Image (cartoon, helix red, strand yellow):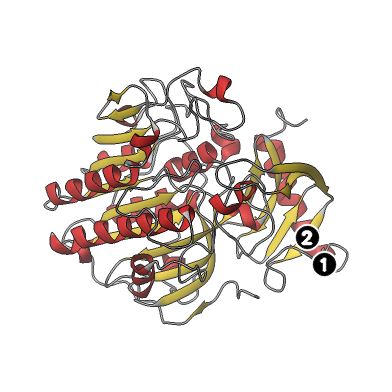
Amino acid sequence: MALLLGAVCLGTLAVPAAAPERPPNFVVIFLDDAGWGDFRPFGDPAYPTPNVQRLAEEGCRYDNFYVPQAVCSASRAALLTGCNPGRTKVFGAYAPRVRGLDPQYATLGEVLRAAGYATASFGKWHVGDHPETRPHARGFDESCGLMVSNDMWEFHPENPEFWGRYPLQYWDNGRVTIERVTPEHQTLLTTWITERAVDFIRRHRARPFLLYVPHPMPHVPLYVSDKFEGKSGVGLYGDVMMELDWSVGEIVRALEETGVTHQTLVLFTSDNGPWISYGNHAGVTPFREAKGTGFDGGIRSPCIVKFPGRIAAGSRSTQAFSTIDILPTFAQLAGAALPRNPIDGRDVWDLMIGKAGAVNPHDYYPFSTGQTFEGVISGDGRWKLHLPHAYRTLVRAANDGAAGQYRQDRIDLSLFDLLKDPFETRNVLAEEPEVAARLQAWAEAHRQRFYAELNP
């Protein structure tokens, strides 16, 4: 499977239309641990996903969309701030009651609320669990959901004593409404989040809005409502995927019924690749490794963007860009001021619409796991340099909610040509010395600037 990089195929992207009468609405649907191949048209799962497929048919599918770190909190902070983990020092996944993302880094909610937007976050927050770092303090007028991952509770399969120190709570507009989330509550999370998202759209049709929907699923433990239990016929993971697909359909239908479809950009993606140690409770990716690594199975996520009249229906792009680019791109479309703090993302709207001659404004995108800086990808998405580092690789997957087994492996300095080898199997370091030298220089400059104190 050779994915053409820096090209646009299967449809011609639209030239930007005249400016809309008001700034656009933004809907960001951000799944948790969904695999690149879990939905059509990216993969061919045994269960139907008609609403995600329709979203792609009415928008653009992006095959080379990256997150800078394939772990929960780091990935969310990058999306919300437009900053790489090395800048914010948000690494890995936060435990409960951790302060989290420093308020000095503005969020997308703060940027758009300052420009007059109504803002909401419904789902899994996971970038801070103190009063000054929860959604209402970080630019979101309305919120509900979990502060941390849904497995950080007393029923954790590996370390229930540690994760059970604090009960998993459900929050609603700044207060705890469920003191101890139970399995029965988990079955309703996708439904509750979807209902709130639809209600928010209906109440804010008359003004610009940002709707951020970071679903807790399909992160383990998996739960599904009665209306989707057994519906896929292929097991619980398929049921969960079908319910998430239903959620996408409900949100899109609310946009249509309120007459704001043509004023709204909808972005659908995942925070990272699948957690493959969970076997039949995990998604799939065609790429090397998965969640918790810097290989493309971890950091390349499916992405669809629909914006009628601005992005051509049924198009497909292989331009590379990243979650860090969402904040500045949305700010430009909204006419909003960028944060006062430095950011790493750039406006990539010309790339997203396939404007002739558009070039990625980044020389490179860095990637990391935890506090370990692992390498860079060239801005055009073709070349990927791995610095020497250890990584986890799967030994044995488990099933039905049990965790499998990893071992530590190591990769030496390696250069991959993602145009010819998207699976990172053939090191071309010796064959491309000039490319390798250029990427090594970028990597060393990035390491010195953001990681020298962490990894001397």
Point out which mark residue 415 bears: 2
Q: Residue at x 49, y 25 (%)?
A: 154
- When asked about the image quadrant of residue 405, the answer is top right
Amino acid at the residue labelled 2: Leu
Quarter of the figure with the C terminus:
top right
Q: Position of residue 115 (x, y in %)?
A: 24, 43
Label 1 crowd (10 A; few <14 / some 14-19 / many >=20): few
SS class of the residue under badge 2?
A: strand
Q: Determine whether, in the image, residue 433 is placed left or right of residue 46.
A: right
Q: Where is residue 89 shown, x and y percent of the image? A: 57, 31
Task: Check disc 1 and give the amino acid type.
Answer: Glu
**Crowdedness of circle 2 by 10 Å Cα count: few (<14), some, many (20+)?**
many
The quadrant holding residue 419 is bottom right
- Dividing the image into 4 quarters, which one contains the N terminus? bottom right
Q: Residue at x 63, y 40 (%)?
A: 403
Q: Image check: 165 left or right of 5?
A: left
User: Residue 453 — which label?
Assistant: none
- The first of marks 1 and 2 along the sequence is 2
Q: Position of residue 151 (x, y in %)?
A: 50, 34
- Nearer to the camera, 158 or 120: 158
Q: How many marks?
A: 2
Pair 1/2: label in front: 2
Residue 346 visible to the viewer? no
User: Which residue is identified by label 1?
Assistant: 432
Q: Nearer the viewer, residue 193 or 58?
A: 193
The answer to whether the residue labelled 1 contacts the one labelled 2, judged by CB atoms less than 8 Å apart, is yes
